[in-house]
Image: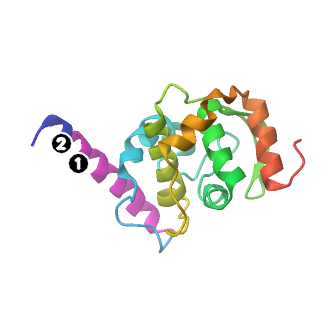
Amino acid sequence: MTQGRRRVAVVVLAAAGVLSGAAANADDAPAAPRFAEGAQTFLANCAVCHRATGVGQPGLAPPLTSYPARYIATAEGRRQLVLTALYGMFGEITVDERHFNFKMPDFSRFDDATLAAVLNFVVFDISHAAATEAPLQPEDVARERSAGLSGEAVRRHRAEVLGAPAS
């Protein structure tokens, strides 16, 4: 087995272990991630705040277990996912009736394919979006790269998508 294949196998096994641990709390959690290629980047960059299973941390980072599945179903929601990954998000939000005031960093340093893979991992493997929803593509990320938004503007867009006031 080459070093590259060994690394992928370790990531897939780690992601499967992470998600199967979540299965104790959710019967519909997959035994292995559908989007394993995004798991490695998520675990290395996002799990420090959102935790490996996406449950978040009180007062620090919101859970990723419900909203991403909602966002993937609409054009503006899909855009919100990409904007959040590219530009981060700053300010006060409420998720699952819990308040967060945080500063999520931008991840624009990653290429379009990597960001699409991470977002698909979050949407389908963590948030359990319906399999009938179309995964995000690198082209979806590329389309938003030139927007140059601030994290505050991303938060305001989120409020519009959810039909909530931007506090």
Three-letter code for the amino acid on which mark 2 is drawn: Arg
Quadrant of the drawing holding the C terminus:
top right
Magenta stretch, overall SS = helix
- Is residue 62 visible to us here? no
Say which amino acid is labelled 1.
Ala
Magenta includes 23? yes
Q: Is residue 144 left or right of residue 120?
A: right
The quadrant of the image that shows the N terminus is top left
Task: Report x, y in % for residue 10.
Answer: 25, 45
Residue at 55% across, 35% down: 142
Report whether 96 appears left or right of 61: right
**Image vertical order of residue 33 relative to residue 50, above or below:** below
Q: Which mark is residue 44?
A: none
Q: Secondary structure at mark 2?
A: helix
Q: Nearer the viewer, residue 125 or 47?
A: 125
Are the two marked residues, 2 and 1, in contact with CB atoms closer than 8 angstroms? yes
Give residue 138's position: percent from left, percent from top.
48, 41
Residue at image x 20%, y 37%? 4
Region of the chain picked out in magenta, as a range = 7-25
- Residue 120 on the magenta span: no
Q: Which residue is mark 1?
A: 9
Residue density around tag 2, few if under 14, some if 14–19, many if 20 or more, within 10 Å = few
The circle drawn on residue 6 is 2
**Residue at the limit of the structure toward the bottom, as seen here:** 27
